[in-house]
Amino acid sequence: MSYWTILLAVEAAAEEGGGGLFDIDATLPLMAVQFLILVAILNAIFYKPLGQAIDGRDSYIRTNLTDARERLAKAEHLAKQYEQELAETRRQSQAVIAAAQADAQKIAATKIAEAQQEAQAQREQVQQELDQQKQAAMQSLEQQVDALSRQILEKLLGSSAVG
Amino acid sequence: MEMLNSLSAFTSFPLAELEVGQHLYWHIGNLKVHGQVFLTSWFVIGVLIIVSLLATRNLQRVPSGTQNLMEYALEFIRGLAKDQIGEKEYRPWVPFVGTLFLFIFVSNWSGALVPWKLIELPEGELAAPTSDINTTIAFALLTSLAYFYAGFSKKGLGYFGNYVQPVPFMLPFKIIEDFTKPLSLSFRLFGNILADELVVGVLVLLVPLFVPLPVMALGLFTSAIQALIFATLAAAYIGEAMEDHHGEGHEEH
């Protein structure tokens, strides 16, 4: 507040000199005109170009951002699609594998059954042959036994008794 | 002032002197103008124009240096105008409000930072243009004209409807407000800046070393705040004049 006293003193002192703190004169309108001119100049060289630069950058960033967002959405969509395809393929491959495994098992089972049948058949055949040979052997043996027993009889009773 | 001059006679420092209310008069026809105000205001205008030219000389998408600084300033001014006037209407008023802010801010800081007093004038001394009552009254009257223009251009004669909102008995107060607005605007700025310069001047006169520094720092702060207040209030008045008939008043600082 001290400057108010100074100010009053100045006012008193400046009465004759035409000066003073509250000396309002042509400075006021000239300053106003000068200020308006400054507004016009700054509008031309500062606010307009720099504002355009800022707005241009804003729109540039905005378009880039939406573009990038679109691309991101597309990429995410593609990734999802690929994942789905991948899952589908995996499921298919598993089905194929399962089918192949079932086929193989079936084939193996039939093969095994066939082989067993064949083996059975062969065993039976061999058995049959064996039996035949045994029978044949037995018959020849019996014939020999007959011949031998006749010879024995002849030797014992003489040939007249027999013949 | 004689008191202060006699005080300064006691001190042995010829640097410390204080002049108040003395002007360098220029005579244009039969008009008198304060030359020192115009000299410093031309300096301020020069600084603003040079910095603007530097900032816009080579506009880049990725700003740097002066362009970055001035874009920051412009964003700040736009934010200020947008807050006070509103998203829809603020754009045409950015140059006016922004120039008020920039001019007052650079003036105040030049008064606080540039050692004007070292330049000898035949009469008076150089100081911030805003420490002269003519400058501040000029700006305050321009602000008044600006908000009348804003109101009339937006609503035509319906602008007078503002005077009876929200209740008709507000009419006299609203009319008084039209006079107190420029008065308070101009005297607030003038008083703050002049007081700051005088306080610094008196302190330098009494203790010319280190002691005035905190006050000078405070002065820088006040100067910036005053520029902000002036621009904000101007924008607020313009916004108030243009707002629709169900707004509320704005606070005074």
Image (tube, coloured by chain):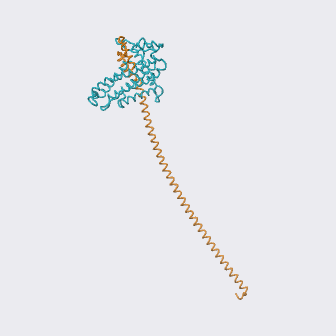
Image coordinates for residue A140, horizontal then vertical, percent:
67, 77
Q: Which quadrant is home to the N terminus of chain A?
A: top left
Would residue A43 be visible to someone looking at this image?
A: no
Residue B250, above or below A120: above
Looking at the picture, tell me which residue is in the foreground, A144 or B40.
B40
Would residue A87 be visible to someone looking at this image?
A: yes
Chain depicted in cyan: B
Q: Quadrant of residue B42?
A: top left
Image coordinates for residue A103, horizontal then vertical, percent:
53, 59
Please state if A43 lies on the left or on the right of A119 as rendered: left
Image coordinates for residue B133, horizontal then vertical, percent:
37, 18
Picture mark count? 0
Image coordinates for residue B95, horizontal then vertical, percent:
38, 25
Residue found at the very far left of the displayed protein: B168
Looking at the picture, tell me which residue is in the foreground, B244 or A132.
B244
Q: Which quadrant is home to the C terminus of chain A?
A: bottom right
Q: Quadrant of residue A70?
A: top left
Looking at the picture, tell me which residue is in the foreground, B170 or B94.
B170
Q: Quadrant of residue B21?
A: top left
Residue A123, above or below A9: below
Chain depicted in orange: A
**What residue do we see at 72% from left, 84% from top?**
A152
**What residue do we see at 51% from left, 53% from top?**
A94
Looking at the picture, tell me which residue is in the foreground, B121 or A62.
B121
